[in-house]
Amino acid sequence: MSWLDVAKTGGLWALEVLAIAVPVALSVAYITYMERRIIGWMQVRKGCNRVGPAGLLQPIADGIKLFLKETIIPTAANKFLFVAAPVMSLLPVLVAFAVVPFGETTLFGLWKTAHVMAISNLNVGVLYVMAISSLGIYGILMAGWASNSKYAFLGAMRATCQMVSYEISMGFAIVSVLMLAGSLNLAEIVHAQQGGFWHWYLIPLFPMFLVYFISGVAETNRSPFDLTEGESEIVAGFFVEYSGMWFATFSLAEYAAMILISLMTSIMFLGGWDAPLPFLDFIPGTVWLLGKTAFLIFVFIWFRATFPRYRYDQLMRLGWKVFLPVTLVWIAVIGAAIYTPGLSEVIGFWRPGGGS
Amino acid sequence: MLELGFFYLFAGLAVVAALGVITARNPVHSVMWLIFCFFNAAGLFFLLDAEFIGILLILVYVGAVMVLFMFVVMMLHVNLAALREGFLRYLPLGGAIAAALLAEIVAAGFSGVFTRVPNPGHSGGQVNNTVEIGKVLYTKYLLGFEVAAVILLVALVGAVVLTIRKRKDAKYQNIARQVAVKPSERLRKVRM
C-alpha cells in the first residue's frame, strides 16, 4: 500500500465522518428550535417566532451568540480537565454514530447488491453503541469535579449514579432483542424485522420497548429525569460554572445523545428502515427511519412538557426495583417461549429462520 | 503498513498512559490515564480482529469499573504526600518484578514459541467472534462459566448484606400504598 492509497483511504474516512457529523450538528440546532416551538404549542403560547420566517433562524442566532460569548474559567478550577470535559462528553456520542445504519442503498442501481449505509457495519454494533455511549459519563464527572464547585460536584454525582443504574436495565432490554434477532449487528436486527409492522419487535417485546426508551430518557438526563441539573436545588448541576461555547458543547452532546437513543430505539424495536405496510416500500427506507426517529424525539420533548421532575429516591427505585426485575422476567419469558413446543412456533414468527 | 502503524500507535500510547498512571500528581489524573490505557489495549484487540473482547474491555472496565474508581477517588481526599512516601521504599521490589517479567517475555520471544504458531491472518467478516465465543463458552466451558456465575452471585449477596441496614427512626415510604390510596381515605366532605 503506497502513501497515495493511505491518503485516499484517509480522505474517504474524513468524508464519511463529515457526512454523519454535519447533519447531526444541524439536526441538534433544529431540535432546539423544534423543542421550543412544541413546548410553546403545548403550553398555549407562541415560542420563538421573531428571528427569520417563523423563527427559523433562531438556532443560528443562538449559536452565534454562544460562540461569541466569553468562556470563563474559574480560578480554582482544574484548567485542563475543565476545558477537556465538554469535549469528552460530546466525543463518545459522535463516535457512536459510526455504526448506526441509516438504511440500505444500491446507489440508484449502480451496485449489484444493497449496501448498508453506515460508516462501519460492525458485527458487534449493538455492544459498540452501548460501550461508547456509556463513556459520556466521564465528561459529566470531569465537569463536576474540575469546576471545584459544590453544586457542580453534586450534579455530577447524581448524573453518575443515574447513568450507571439505567444502563443495566437498558442492557437487559437489548439482550431480549438479541435473543429474537440472533445477531449483534444492527443491520441484521433490522433485517430480522422486515415485512410490515407486525414483524417489528415492538409487539413481542412491548415492555422492553418501554423500558429501553424510558431508560434512554434517563440516560440522556432529560426531563423528567433531569435532576442532575435540578435548578431548584443545585442551580444547574454539573455545568453550573460553564459559559459560552463550552456550555453549548454540553447541550450539543445532550441533544446528539437524544438523537442516538431515538435512532437505536427505531432500529431495535420499530423495524429501522422497514415500511410499516409492505406496499409503502416505494418510499426510501432512510425516510422511514428518520421519520420514526423524529417521532421519538418528539416524544422526548412531549415528556419534558408533561411530567414533573422525579425525586432522587424515586428515580433510583424506578431503575432498580421496577425496570431491572421487569427486564429479567421478560428475558426468562422469551427464553422459555423459544424452547416450549407450543409457544416456539408463536415466538418463531419474529425470529429469522425459527418457526414458520 | 497502516496496521503496523496503528499497532505502534496503540502500543506506544498504552505505555505512555501506563507511565502517566504512576507519575501523575493528582489521583483523578491517574484514573484518567488508566482509562486512556484501557482504550489503547482495546485498540490492540481490534487490530487482532478480537472485536468482542475489545468492546467488552471498554464496556466493563471503562464504562463501569473505572466510573466507580473515579467515584471513590473523587469522594475521598487522598493524601498524596503519604502515598508518595512509600514510592522509594517499594521501588526495589516493584523493579525486581518488572525486571523478572521483562526477562520472561524476552526469553519467550527468543525461544521460538511465537514463530511456531501459524499466523492466523485476518478472518475479516467471515468469522463472527461473538458467535464463536458463545459456542465455546456454553458447551466446552459451561462448568467454569456457571461456577463464575455462582461466585458473582455470592459477591452480590455479600455486598447487599454488608451495606443493608435500616434505621428505626427513619421514615420510609411505602410506594405501593401511596399508589393504591383512594380519594375516600384522604378526603372528607364537610357539609357547610
Image (cartoon, coloured by chain):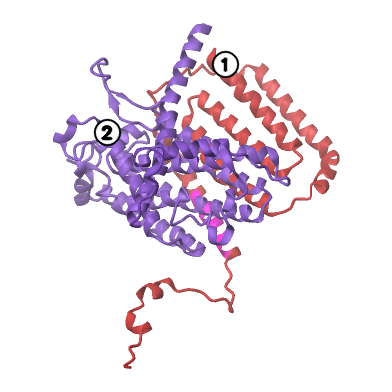
The part of the image, by quadrant, that contains residue A200 is: top left
Image quarter where the N terminus of chain B lies is: top right
Question: Mark 1 falls within which chain?
Answer: B
Query: In the rendered picture, chain B carries what hue?
Result: red
Q: Which residue is the site of mark 2?
A: A287
Q: Does the magenta stretch include residue B157?
A: yes
Front-most of residues A68 and A139: A68
**Residue A31 at x, y percent in the picture:** 39, 42
**Residue A333 at x, y percent in the picture:** 31, 54
Badge 1 amino acid: Leu
Secondary structure under badge 1?
A: helix
Q: Which residue is the site of mark 1?
A: B4
Please name the predominant secondary structure of the magenta segment in the image.
helix
Chain painted in purple in the figure: A
Part of the protein shown in magenta: B149-161
**Residue A15 at x, y percent in the picture:** 44, 20
Badge 2 amino acid: Val
